[in-house]
Image (cartoon, rainbow, N blue to C red):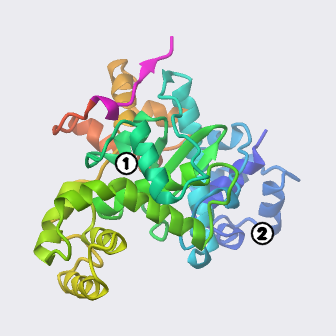
Amino acid sequence: MISSSRITVARRRRGLTLAELSHLTGVSIQSLSNYERGRTEPTPDTLEKLATSLNFPESFFHEPDLDPIPADSVSFRARSRLAAGPRDGALAASRLVMELNDWIETRFKLPPNQLPTLDKLDPESAADVLRARWGLGNAPISNMVHLLEAHGVRVFSLPPEFTDVDAFSLWREGTPFVFLSTLKTAERGRFDAAHELGHLVLHGVERSHSGPQAEKEANAFASAFLMPRDSITEHIPDNPMVSQVLEAKKVWKVAAMALTYRLHDLGMLTDWHYRRTCVELGKRGFRKSEPQGLPVREKSQLLEKVFNAFQAKNISFRDVARELHVDTEELSSWVFGLVVTLRSGTPSGRRPSRRERPHLSLVP
């Protein structure tokens, strides 16, 4: 039995239209449409052509149907400017990632969801409340990805071909998911993670994740969560020089432009100083990149622990990919390129604090 929905997911994952897939396979558009609608099934020869063109093993198409992720349940930034192809491709990839998450959850006890619903609060207050509930105080957050994972958020990476998609989040069966691009600067990645956290706690499963107002609220939450008012006002003087902004951004591990915007929002930069600082930062290249920024992007600690546990049981990365009916390159694109990390050993560096370490135990 061939799963019609998996043909659709595989095609969208590769960013192909029916016409483009028809050209690759030599199969008519009408036949492909019938396969995806479940009206007819491809012959063995045709299935082989589809599997080769879509770069999925034939076994992938024999697995159970995949229910699609509704586009309106996802917080895509700049939705009006995002083409249907990249949007559908990112959704297809995230649906496959959920197969990985389900597979992991049958083998490990992962951290439970600890995200409150704060939809009655304004973004600044919501950020303060969440920091208090998680015992963060006003201290800078050392690692956003680890923090999210420790509180039950499943964090995965977006395949690198989706250059137009910064990040997105969604709820699925009571579990919060965040998907992050690996193509942005480390500082931008941290802000994206906080932005998606804002969507999850402010908008939840009831309110719409999309639209200018939702994006504005998520941005305000991220700014307040990463750069608490009391911490900023205590350590930075009013109308600081650019050199002071560049030094201070290292403390909160944020982009220079993000800190500048926060200072202006808090009334610590006059309109004139704000414009002047933005112009100067732009001349130094801070609008498009983050010169001398954080050396590495934040990655998943939870996934690293999972795959290290598999390795200890002589279960290779390739074995996991085979279980999920994908190749190792596809699997690696979901987990921050973790296969490279595993081959070279666990990276050294600062040991995460206890509250940042996601609890993980094998399910008997």
Q: CA distance from mark 1 to mark 2?
A: 35 Å
Please name whichever residue, 133 or 308, is drawn nearer the observer in this view of the structure: 133
Looking at the rendered image, the disc whose residue lies closer to the viewer, 1 or 2, is 1
What amino acid does circle 1 point to?
Answer: Phe
Q: Which mark is residue 336?
A: 1
Q: How many marks?
A: 2
The secondary element bearing badge 1 is classed as loop
Please name whichever residue, 79 or 31, is drawn nearer the observer in this view of the structure: 79
Q: In percent of the image, x 77 and y 68: which residue is there?
A: 28
* Of the image marks 1 and 2, the number of the one nearer the N terminus: 2
Density class for disc 1 (Cα within 10 Å; few <14, some 14-19, many ≥20) is many
Mark 2 lies on residue: 29
In the rendered structure, the answer to whether residue 63 lies left or right of residue 288 reads right
What amino acid does circle 2 point to?
Answer: Ile
- Is 359 a magenta residue? yes
Please name whichever residue, 73 or 219, is drawn nearer the observer in this view of the structure: 219
Density class for disc 2 (Cα within 10 Å; few <14, some 14-19, many ≥20) is some
Location of residue 307 in the rendering, given as x and y in whole percent from the top left corner: 38, 30
Q: Answer whether residue 40 is visible to the viewer in this image.
A: yes
Residue 42 versus residue 15 in the image, above or below: above
In the rendered structure, the answer to whether residue 245 lies left or right of residue 14 reads left
